[in-house]
């Protein structure tokens, strides 16, 4: 495990294997840049994300366009990429305070911890990284030094947020044979050991007794029983009750509307919403946020077999609404429908669901961006703003009356797919809207993380595979809410 420590010493006084120096806005004249001539000779321009290790002075130089928080995060993770194959065990870096003191300390730590995540669970020969510690010297690049107190707070927040993201990544990267619904429940139960956290796990009998037939139908052809997981974090005098609901499809084969094989690979990541809400609750408890927070997970596996639910079936959801199944691959919304009904019984002040819900969302926004939907413009904008500050990309997708008509059914109250091939992310959101009671319409956000949750190529500080999408955005958002 990589440790990050704060030091009151000057960067040059720190006794470490190498230093990291960010070259801000191509400024090679800064006092920390000791190798100007050599850097020029090597063709180093200091462009964003450009890296160069200078062995003669034991310095890792990283280009960074500005003191913008996200630039700093990216630069920190780039620096680690550069030393990954070396035998360096310790590094030191100064601070790069931007507009808000503390913010970039947080960004540096997040960049280091997110960039150092390594998924090697299934490698027979593990190559543990050599780097053990990074010293963050409280000597600033250009501004007065920030206090040890605010740096300590920033470090604590960044650590909790990045570790929760890595926790979430680890769950998502787990293979479907290992992370079954009950295995996911066991992981949740371990979180129940955190201070002020409890975990309840409900089985198929509970789902039956509570009329959660849409959820049950999705899991019917699986050899693994489904689980409804309910984690609760309760601090003293909570300001609000925030309820998260996560799609936890431990595998999505598409069911009888079987996915083509090239689309089936990566569907172990269909539990990313579940992993995110669990990660969020973990960090919230660690940071002792002043909200009562619930993480509700619908854990199921969408498979084929003689017992499978079928296109043409009609399901009765927990709230009594009937759903015509026209495509068994639109299963996430069925599980979420019942879980959202369950969640509203707890009378949330805010209700957020997170799901790898539609390929259409990836088509609409690209692979890097979360789709944000709901009825409350203020809430959506506040979330997008917090998400941007966290370094996660998100954008709102607007509901409209015409798209709403496309999920009408002739045989049941509603169809599980749209009659049009366009606007699929929004029609999926509108399907979920049928399960939101009037009293909660303005308290609800739907986050479609199908794009950023999992990618078979590294990007920014995200390695190959799971990114932990949604964890940082929601924690930044709740930290904002805690200030109100
Ligand atoms: N889990 C998928 C959505 C998905 C696609 C997530 C790509 C991540 C990457 C979801 O259950 C699904 O299959 N949705 C269908 C809906 C369609 C049948 C209306 C889709 O997007 O094709
Ligand atoms: Zn599906
Ligand atoms: Zn799915």
Image (cartoon, rainbow, N blue to C red):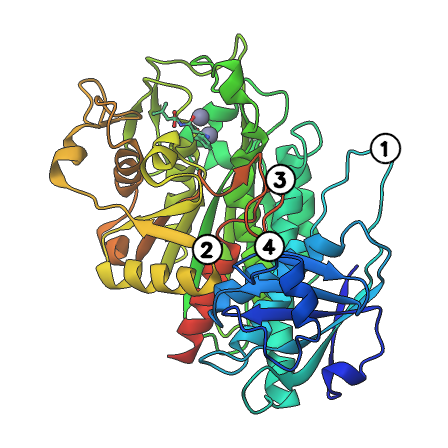
Task: Measure the C-alpha gap from mark 1 to mark 4.
Answer: 25 Å
Cβ of mark 1 under 8 Å from ligand 1: the answer is no
Residue at x 82%, y 63% (from the top left corner): 132
Task: Measure the C-alpha gap from mark 2 to mark 1.
Answer: 33 Å
Label 3: which residue?
Answer: 464
Q: Residue furthest top?
A: 306
Q: Nearer the viewer, mark 3 or mark 4?
A: 3
Label 4: which residue?
Answer: 165
Q: Position of residue 343 (x, y in %)?
A: 41, 50
Tell me the SS state at disc 2.
Answer: loop
Q: Is residue 239 visible?
A: no
Label 2: which residue?
Answer: 392
Callout 3 touching callout 4 (CB < 8 Å):
no
Q: Looking at the picture, tell me which residue is in the foreground, 231 or 33.
A: 33
Return the disc, 2 or 1, that comes first in the chain's sequence. 1
Residue 294 relative to residue 347: left or right: right
Residue 220 relative to residue 113: left or right: left
Label 1: which residue?
Answer: 124
Task: Measure the C-alpha gap from mark 3 to mark 4.
Answer: 14 Å
Residue at x 73%, y 81% (from the top left corner): 11
Q: Is disc 2 surrounded by few (<14), some (14 to 19) or many (20+) residues within 10 Å?
A: many
Q: Nearer the viewer, mark 2 or mark 4?
A: 2
User: Which image quadrant: the N terminus?
Assistant: bottom right
């Amino acid at each position: 495990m990589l440790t990050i420590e704060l030091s009151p010493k000057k960067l040059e006084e720190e006794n470490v294997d190498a230093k990291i120096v960010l070259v801000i806005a191509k400024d090679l004249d800064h006092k920390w840049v000791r190798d100007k001539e050599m850097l020029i000779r090597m063709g180093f321009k200091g462009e964003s994300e450009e890296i160069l290790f200078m062995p003669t002075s034991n310095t890792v130089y990283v280009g960074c366009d500005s003191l913008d928080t996200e630039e700093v995060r990216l630069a920190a993770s780039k620096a680690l990429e550069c030393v990954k194959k070396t035998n360096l065990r310790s590094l030191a870096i100064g601070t790069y305070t931007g507009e808000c003191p503390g913010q970039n300390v947080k960004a540096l730590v997040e960049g280091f911890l997110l960039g150092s995540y390594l998924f090697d669970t299934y490698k027979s020969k593990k190559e543990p990284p050599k780097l053990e510690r990074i010293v963050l010297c409280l000597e600033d690049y250009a501004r007065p030094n920030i206090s040890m107190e605010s740096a300590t707070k920033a470090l604590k927040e960044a650590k909790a947020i990045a570790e929760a993201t890595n926790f979430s990544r680890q769950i998502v990267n787990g293979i479907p044979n290992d992370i079954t619904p009950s295995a996911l429940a066991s992981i949740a139960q371990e979180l129940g050991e955190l201070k002020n956290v409890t975990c309840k796990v409900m089985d198929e009998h509970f789902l039956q007794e509570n009329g959660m037939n849409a959820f049950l139908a999705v899991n019917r052809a699986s050899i693994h029983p489904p689980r409804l997981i309910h984690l609760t974090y309760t601090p003293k005098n909570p300001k609000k009750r925030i309820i998260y609901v996560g799609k936890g499809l431990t595998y999505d084969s598409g069911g009888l509307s079987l996915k083509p094989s090239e689309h089936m690979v990566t569907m172990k990541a269909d539990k990313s919403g579940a992993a995110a809400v669990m990660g969020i609750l973990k960090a919230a408890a660690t940071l002792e946020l002043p909200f009562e927070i619930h993480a509700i997970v619908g854990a199921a596996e969408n498979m084929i077999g003689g017992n499978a639910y079928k296109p043409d079936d009609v399901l009765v959801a927990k709230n009594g609404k009937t759903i015509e199944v026209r495509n068994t691959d639109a299963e996430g919304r069925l599980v979420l429908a019942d879980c959202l009904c369950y969640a509203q019984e707890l009378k949330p002040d805010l209700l957020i669901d997170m799901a790898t819900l539609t390929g259409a969302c990836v088509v609409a926004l690209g692979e890097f961006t979360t789709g944000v939907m709901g009825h409350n413009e203020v809430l959506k904008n506040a979330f997008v703003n917090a998400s941007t500050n966290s370094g996660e990309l998100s954008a709102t997708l607007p509901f409209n009356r015409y798209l709403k008509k496309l999920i009408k059914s002739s045989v049941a109250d509603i169809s599980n797919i749209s009659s049009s091939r366009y606007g699929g992310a929004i029609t999926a959101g509108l399907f979920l809207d049928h399960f939101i009671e009037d009293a909660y319409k303005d308290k609800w956000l739907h986050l479609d993380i199908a794009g950023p949750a999992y990618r078979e190529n590294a990007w920014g500080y995200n390695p190959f595979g799971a990114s932990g999408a949604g964890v940082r955005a929601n924690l930044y958002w709740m930290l904002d809410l805690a200030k109100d």
